[in-house]
Image (spheres, rainbow, N blue to C red):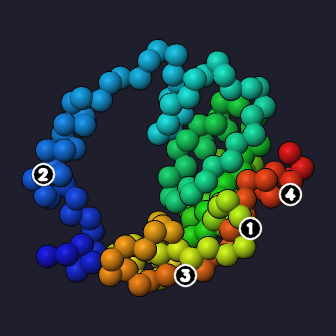
Amino acid sequence: MSEKYLKFSIYLVDPLRRRSFSFEQKNTEKPSEDLVAYGNYFLIGNNIPDKPIVFSLGIGEDTRFDEAILDRHDARLFLFDPVPRSLSYVKTRKKLEKAEFEQIAVCDYDGELEVYIDDLQPNLDTTTSVTSVKRIGNNNSFSVPCKSIPTLLRERKI
């Protein structure tokens, strides 16, 4: 039975994947004490400037990190994701009102990027993730605008 048919991930149904997940949980070292949790990421807390500029790429529908940055710092936060669903999500997050969102992919050039959606979603509007790598049997692709980091910095006068 495929994930496409079931409409949900069967990742942990597979016994090998379950064992692998369990192994990772048991054998992953705890972060060192100089690391500070920011949502779902850890940063070296004393290395963050008072007014950081943060580019968050491919946010999907998980902005725990971004919201933690805004909670703790007077940050300029820029969010980037080419997926329309991410824009809809950001609009529902009150904490992100100070952030700037642009619906683009970030790449090493400016122009267009061909992306492929996962097999569980029929189109770009409903998917939460895309990849620039074509997997066997996945022909659901779309062209999205992309910009490079130097362009994004220049546009924001950073």
Identify the residue position indicated by label 2 in the image: 16
Q: Which mark is residue 155?
A: 4
The N terminus lies in which quarter of the figure? bottom left
Label 1 packing within 10 angstroms: few (<14), some (14-19), many (20+): some
Q: Are marks 3 and 1 in contact (CB under 8 Å)?
A: no
Q: Between tags 4 and 1, which lies in front?
A: 1
Q: Position of residue 155 (x, y in %)?
A: 86, 57
| SS category of the residue bearing label 1 | loop
Q: Position of residue 83 (x, y in %)?
A: 57, 70
Work out whether residue 33 or residue 148 is closer to the camera in this orientation and state it: 148
| SS category of the residue bearing label 3 | strand
Mark 4 or 2 closer to N-term? 2
Q: Amino acid at mark 1?
A: Asp
Q: Are marks 4 and 2 in contact (CB under 8 Å)?
A: no
Q: Are marks 1 and 2 in contact (CB under 8 Å)?
A: no
Q: Is residue 8 visible?
A: yes
Q: Indicate left or right for 33 with 147 as reference.
A: left
Instruction: Give the spatial CA distance, label 4 vs label 1.
Output: 12 Å
Mark 3 or 4 closer to N-term? 3
Q: Position of residue 26 (x, y in %)?
A: 21, 30
Q: Amino acid at mark 2?
A: Leu
Q: Which mark is residue 142?
A: 3
Identify the residue position indicated by label 1 in the image: 110
Instruction: Give the spatial CA distance, label 3 vs label 4.
Output: 25 Å
Mark 1 or 2 closer to N-term? 2
Q: Amino acid at mark 3?
A: Phe
**111 is higher (above) or lower (below) than 95:** below
